[in-house]
Structures are given as structure tokens and as C-alpha cells.
Image (cartoon, rainbow, N blue to C red):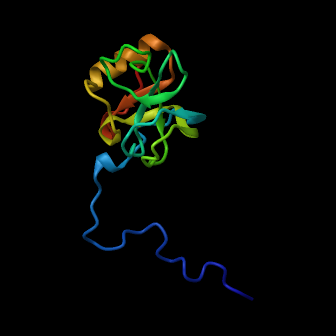
Amino acid sequence: MTNLTSGYEDLGRAASSSDTYTPADVLLAGSFPLDTSAGTLLDQNAVLPAFSLVGRITASGKLTLSAQAASDGSQVPVGVTIVEYPDTGADIPNVTFYRSGNFNFDALNLGAGWTLANLRVAVENSGVPLFFGQPATATPTV
């Protein structure tokens, strides 16, 4: 009989006793259900890191890094990117992002002007099911 668990004794254990836990490395801050959507990312003229807060430009419907003081519609966050997107010099179609979830604010790539307090207010006013906190204080605001 073959032992199917052989070799998996250390699965889930730290690689060494010096491994440390850093709260900012944890994307999720709670258990609110994740849901995904896709859209076209406007050419950013730069790499867009994973876990970037994105908004949708009203005129074009394209996604871009959300900045608190924007006035083109992207000041309303619609999601968090899942992976990094390269600088391609063009718009990127079929960009997948989380459109719901409870996220660790400290793990996000944010556009200018966002604080935890004003981000919570922005999403509460928009009705988008995004919640933000820190792992130790992950209480969704409604």
C-alpha cells in the first residue's frame, strides 16, 4: 500500500524559526465574500502593482488607479486588482479585479489622497461592497 501523505509532513509550517509574520503582507482583513469582475485598464504609463485600488472613468468605462481627488469618476473605488499589470504602452483588456471583499488597507497600492477613514466613507457612499481595515481590527463598516 502506498502512503499518500509521505513527504507532506511539513506542509503549512514556517520554512525556518526566523520567519516572521507581517500584517501588511496579508491582503484580506476579514471574511466578507470575494467576488471578481473584469474590465479594461487604461494605459498607466507605469507598472500597476497587484492589490491596487481602482476606479472606473465615467466617460470611457476604463479602470485606472483610484485617486481620492480625481473628478473623472475614478475617485469612486470599484475594486482591487489581483495581479500586477505591466506597462504595455496600451490599454489592457480583461483585467480581473476583486469587486467585493474585506481588505487590509496597509496591503493596498493606493492612489494619492486615500486614508483609511476617507476610503471607508467613499465606499459607504457608493454602495460598492468593499470594506477596509487592518487584520487586528477587521470590522467591516456598512
- Camera-side residue of 25 and 42: 42
Check the image and report above or below for 93 versus 141.
below
* Residue 99 position by quadrant: top right
* Residue 109 position by quadrant: top left
133 with respect to 142 (left or right): left
In the current view of this chain or complex, which residue is farthest to the right? 1
At 36% from the left and 73% from the top, the residue drawn is 15
Q: Position of residue 134 (x, y in %)?
A: 32, 36
Check the image and report above or below for 135 versus 22.
above
Quadrant of the rendering where the C terminus is positioned: top left
88 with respect to 108 (left or right): right
At 54% from the left and 20% from the top, the residue drawn is 60
Q: Position of residue 8 (x, y in %)?
A: 54, 77
At 49% from the left and 37% from the top, the residue drawn is 31
Check the image and report above or below for 14 versus 44.
below
Q: Position of residue 22 (x, y in %)?
A: 28, 52
In the current view of this chain or complex, which residue is farthest to the front? 89
Quadrant of the rendering where the N terminus is positioned: bottom right
Check the image and report above or below for 24 versus 43.
below
In the current view of this chain or complex, which residue is farthest to the top? 125
At 52% from the left and 15% from the top, the residue drawn is 59
- Camera-side residue of 130 and 92: 92
Q: Position of residue 65 (x, y in %)?
A: 39, 31
* Residue 4 position by quadrant: bottom right
